[in-house]
Amino acid sequence: MLSYRHAFHAGNHADMLKHFVLYLTLDYFNRKDKPYWYIDTHSGAGLYDLRGNEAQKVGEYKQGIALLQQAAKLPPGLHDFLGRLNAILPEPHLYCGSPWLAQAMLRPADKLRLFELHPADFQHLQHNMQQARLGRRGQVVQADGYQGLIALLPPPTRRAVVLIDPPYEEKQDYERVVHTLKEAQKRFAQGCYLVWYPCLSREESRKLPAQLQKIAPDNYLQAELHVQRPRSDGFGMHGSGMFIINPPYLLAQQLQESLPALAALLAQDDGARFVLDFQIK
Ligand code: SAM
């Protein structure tokens, strides 16, 4: 069942953490000349209109990208991130999805492989990637991203950034993320895997980080951004996390410099905080 539409959530606090980490990771990969692949297992539509009905319904972006744009002062990492977003967005009322950010950052020799299952969002993604002149740099595929990823590994370049960003509306996403990462590790252990996950009261969500740590106990980074206290009724997403296997060398330091400011900026109550934990060989 595909009920999730990212257009309702584009530019929210979770996108800020996810896209900031993705930006830092791709920026790091661009420091070496050797080409790499970017694989997005759950791509979404690629580009979102913040003036559209979906984004306006709850207005989640007002507690995300809008707060970054209104900030009087940002630490250098977040300042550069915002500058990059402003430079790559075709119009100020648009916000990027992960594929748009990635296509703008990848070099001509790098390759993109984008998976999206939802028929309408797949069409939007195709259209947006045509606008971006993706051409031979990339492929947009309407298929299951978990299976699609495994079929691509190892990539010919032996260098890759993989984003796994499911909706987690169904319990099976938690199991499939863990299973897929285990399989991916067997085929391509040196890949840089970025997994987004929601911080919810439900058990599967609370257990996921520990399960992910077991997959790569010696080489991971976990960053969480909590924007509010967990609700007493147990509902709602009070924050989100990024779990990275084989994180870029500089990422821990970069996040240490920026997460305090990001947590303060996006705070919705006095429960706002961040978590940064890593183990790097
Ligand atoms: N990564 C995007 C970004 O940062 O802009 C947002 C992706 S959104 C959270 C998750 C997307 O995954 C939705 O568009 C949904 O239709 C799609 N989806 C759900 N299950 C999928 C699957 N098994 N394979 C590929 N896409 C899937």
Image (spheres, rainbow, N blue to C red):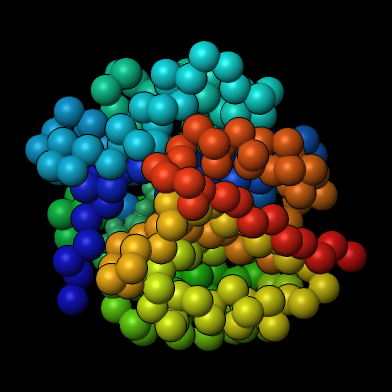
Quick one: 157 or 216, which is closer to the camera?
216
Image label count? 0
Q: Is residue 115 above or below residue 168?
A: above
Q: Is residue 42 above or below residue 65?
A: below
Q: Which of the 4 image quadrants contains residue 222?
A: bottom right
Direction from residue 130 to residue 58 in the image, left or right: left
**Residue furthest toward the right?**
281
Q: Is residue 204 above or below residue 85?
A: below
Q: Which of the 4 image quadrants contains residue 47?
A: top left
Question: Would residue 279 be seen by someone viewing this image from the given angle?
Answer: yes
Residue at 60% over, 51% down? 274
Direction from residue 190 to residue 92 in the image, left or right: left
Residue at 31% over, 53% down? 44
Residue at 50% over, 76% down? 206
Question: Would residue 136 be seen by someone viewing this image from the given angle?
Answer: no
- Quadrant location of the C terminus? bottom right
Direction from residue 110 to residue 119 in the image, left or right: left
Point out residue 178 in the picture as x, y percentages from the top left corner: 54, 81
Quick one: 214 or 271, which is closer to the camera?
271
- Quadrant location of the N terminus? bottom left
Quick one: 122 or 166, which is closer to the camera?
166
Point out residue 27 in the picture as x, y percentages from the top left corner: 67, 36
Point out residue 11 in the picture as x, y percentages from the top left corner: 35, 39
Quick one: 153 or 195, which is closer to the camera?
195
The quarter of the picture showing ligand 1: bottom left
Residue at 17% over, 60% down? 119
Point out residue 265 in the picture as x, y percentages from the top left corner: 50, 33
